[in-house]
């Protein structure tokens, strides 16, 4: 992971996050989280995990058989100088082979080391991946 990704915008950190998922690189993935032990992660259908240890263990289990090929799309972003909240639709392929999607909220804060993830919450959503409709996005 490049220094630019670590010190770049919240969007660059998010791109690095999905890249680390694709490569099954738990170390790179965890480097993107804030140092704060109050960080939290909720995987689809799972409990709330708090702290680096619990989150790292969960990602290690999830990625032990290889990377996740998740295509984030339909980004809705709200931000200020110190925080950025990204709501994304993640396209995936269900176990049945049918296209499906997840809805994720990725929350970033600006730290002395750059933008870092403090919260990730993902839910399974029904149906095919929706098409981005810019007319519905409010800024």
Image (spheres, rainbow, N blue to C red):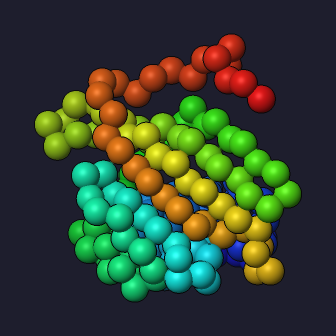
The number of numbered badges drawn on the structure is 0
Q: Farthest residue toward the right?
A: 81
Q: Quadrant of residue 47?
A: bottom left
Q: Quadrant of the N terminus?
A: bottom right
Residue 36 vs 92, above or below: the answer is below
Report x, y in % for residue 54.
36, 80
6 or 53: nearer the viewer: 53
Residue 53 percent across, percent down from the top left? 40, 85
Left or right of 124, for residue 139: right
114 horizontally vs 100: left or right: right
Can I make out residue 117 in this image? yes
Question: Which residue, as the protein is rendered here, is positioned at the far top?
Answer: 135
Residue projecting furthest to the left = 96
* Residue in view at x 30 percent, y 51 percent: 44
> x, y percentage for residue 29?
51, 73
Task: Tell me the residue at 53%/62% (across/down).
Answer: 119
Seen in the picture, residue 43 relative to 115 is either above or below; the reply is: above
| 38 sits to left or right of 83 | left
Whether residue 28 can be seen here: no
Q: Quadrant of residue 22?
A: bottom left
Q: Which residue: 44% across, 54% down? A: 121
Q: Is residue 137 left or right of residue 31?
A: right
Q: Nearer the viewer, residue 118 or 71?
A: 118
**At x 77% / y 29%, what residue is drawn?**
139
Look at the picture and state if 100 lies above or below 62: above
């Amino acid at each position: 992971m490049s220094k630019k990704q670590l010190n770049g915008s919240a969007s660059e950190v998010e791109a690095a996050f999905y890249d680390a998922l694709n490569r099954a690189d738990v170390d790179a993935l965890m480097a993107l989280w804030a140092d704060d032990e109050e960080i939290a992660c909720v995987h689809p259908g799972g409990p709330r995990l708090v702290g680096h240890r619990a989150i790292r263990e969960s990602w290690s289990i999830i990625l032990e058989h290889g990377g996740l090929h998740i295509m984030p799309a339909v980004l809705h972003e709200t931000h200020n100088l110190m925080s950025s909240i990204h709501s994304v639709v993640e396209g995936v392929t269900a176990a049945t082979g049918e296209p499906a999607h997840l809805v994720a909220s990725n929350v970033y804060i600006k730290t002395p080391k750059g933008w870092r993830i403090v919260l990730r919450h993902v839910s399974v959503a029904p149906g095919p991946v929706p098409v981005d409709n810019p007319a519905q996005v409010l800024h």
